[in-house]
Image: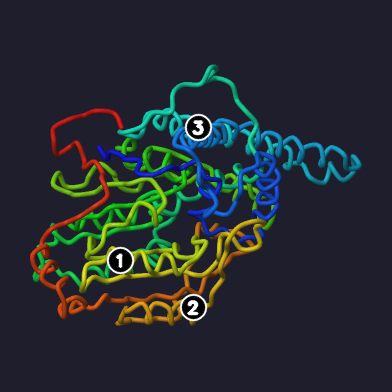
Amino acid sequence: RLTLYQSNQLHSPHLTVGGGHTPREAFSAGINNFQEEEAPQGRPFNKEKMKDSPEEEAKLERQHFWRIIDAFRFYRVHVQEQVKRAEGQILSLPQRHQDLLPDVLSNLARISQCADHNQEILQAVVHNSLHMFENIEYGEREDPRKVCPSTTFDMDKLKSTIKQFIRDWSETGRAERDTCYQPIIEEIQRLFPNDQYDVSKVSVLIPGAGLGRLAWEIARLGYICQGNEWSFFMLFSSNFVLNRCETVNSLTLYPWIHQFSNNKKSSDQTRPIIFPDVNPQSLPLDADFSMVAGDFVEVYSESDSWDCVATCFFIDTAHNVIEYVETIWKILKPGGVWINLGPLLYHFENMADELSVELSYEDIRTAIVNVGFRIEVEKPSVQTTYTENDRSMLRYIYDCVFFVARKPADLYFNGQEGEEEEEDDQQQSFPPAAKSPRREGTDRLT
């Protein structure tokens, strides 16, 4: 089973923003609600201002952990409130209008039933998340059965996370994965072919790994692969899929019940999606696959550590995308490659008291080259979707940029560092992360 290691503090309110690319209009109200909820606590939003004692950091982290647990537990109540409101709207119509709509109330009852089923899955996710980290515990609640209300922002993030199950681990999400993940996988195989490399020694890092499918696919091909994620919503869910889902297509979710607009058929809103489409436990016993929780920039500081960094729908989660560029440059080995695919929907844009530098791709490209990268492949238009409802009357298409940038292999050869690089050429240097205990013959819970 895959063990998850927590490498950095995760309490920050920034945590819940990253990891999704739902068009901003879809949850702008939630963002406003989030700011109203967080601001009175006196916590500055700017990432650079967050300097607390270790005790305060631990306290805030515990609070954040339980806040996200509460969001998972509050889901059913939240959806029931939506259904109750919709029922009230229908019942407020003149009787003659209600008579023209014989199936609406029964469909709302069906939505409520689907929410009950979704809650069962979310409860299983929570149950397997309470002790998910190998190196840290968050204690127990005084009354674990108590359901605490959550902000609109957190509920919107949870709904987005439900759709991530579909994107990463269902047959329904295959087309989207093929357009987003397959170009990255094919490029890794082209750059590090197994007939020229011992791929078991080629290390690939996936920042913003989400529910882990891209990292899992790369590990399945024999590469060393580590996923990194900051969002507890994603971490809880990936832990559940990777460690507790062993039977193909054994679980069901209803991801579209929250969408009350742009439905052609009422049944489209309540259609089921089954997952996982593969057994996540089916990786080869010698697969080297790990997950690390924490902020990408803070976790990955070891120079010349990785052969490849692959970013998919990730770089626009930065407060300052140039900081990501510098970090990737630093951690790549000389000769290593950065593969990127994604748009630029900056996650902190228009959020009060947040550092958010919104650059065009042209500007980012200039910075990439000025840092020292050599761009070897560049496709300025790769169209794809993100957690798309393919039956919706409103669909968003992202016109993404795909590129491969290399850190020159001869970077240090003119000086002393070149000698060190030659000596350490075959050594791997990673953030601390537990490997799969399956290879050690253990079966402990993670």
Q: Residue at label 1?
A: 330
Q: Nearer the viewer, mark 2 or mark 1?
A: 1
* Left or right side of 124 for 185: left
The quarter in which the N terminus is drawn is top left
- Which residue does the image show at 30% across and 66% down from the upper left? 330
Classify mark 2: helix, strand or loop: helix
Can residue 264 be seen here? The reply is no
The disc, 2 or 1, on the residue closer to the chain's N-terminal end is 1
- Which residue does the image show at 65% across and 36% down from the upper left? 78
Q: Residues within 10 Å of mark 1 (few under 14, many from 20)?
A: some
* Residue type of the residue flagged with mark 3: Lys
Classify mark 3: helix, strand or loop: helix
Q: Residue at label 3?
A: 59
Q: CA distance from mark 2 to mark 1?
A: 21 Å
Q: Residue at label 2?
A: 361
Q: Residues within 10 Å of mark 2 (few under 14, many from 20)?
A: few
Q: CA distance from mark 1 to mark 3?
A: 32 Å
Q: Is residue 7 above or below residue 347?
A: above
Can residue 123 be seen here? The reply is yes
Q: CA distance from mark 2 to mark 3?
A: 39 Å
Percent x, y for residue 381? 46, 79
How many numbered markers are drawn? Answer: 3
For this rendering, which residue is in front, 91 or 376? 376
* Left or right side of 137 for 418: left
The quarter in which the C terminus is drawn is top left
Percent x, y for residue 347? 56, 60
The image quarter containing residue 380 is bottom left
* Residue type of the residue flagged with mark 2: Tyr
The disc, 1 or 3, on the residue closer to the chain's N-terminal end is 3
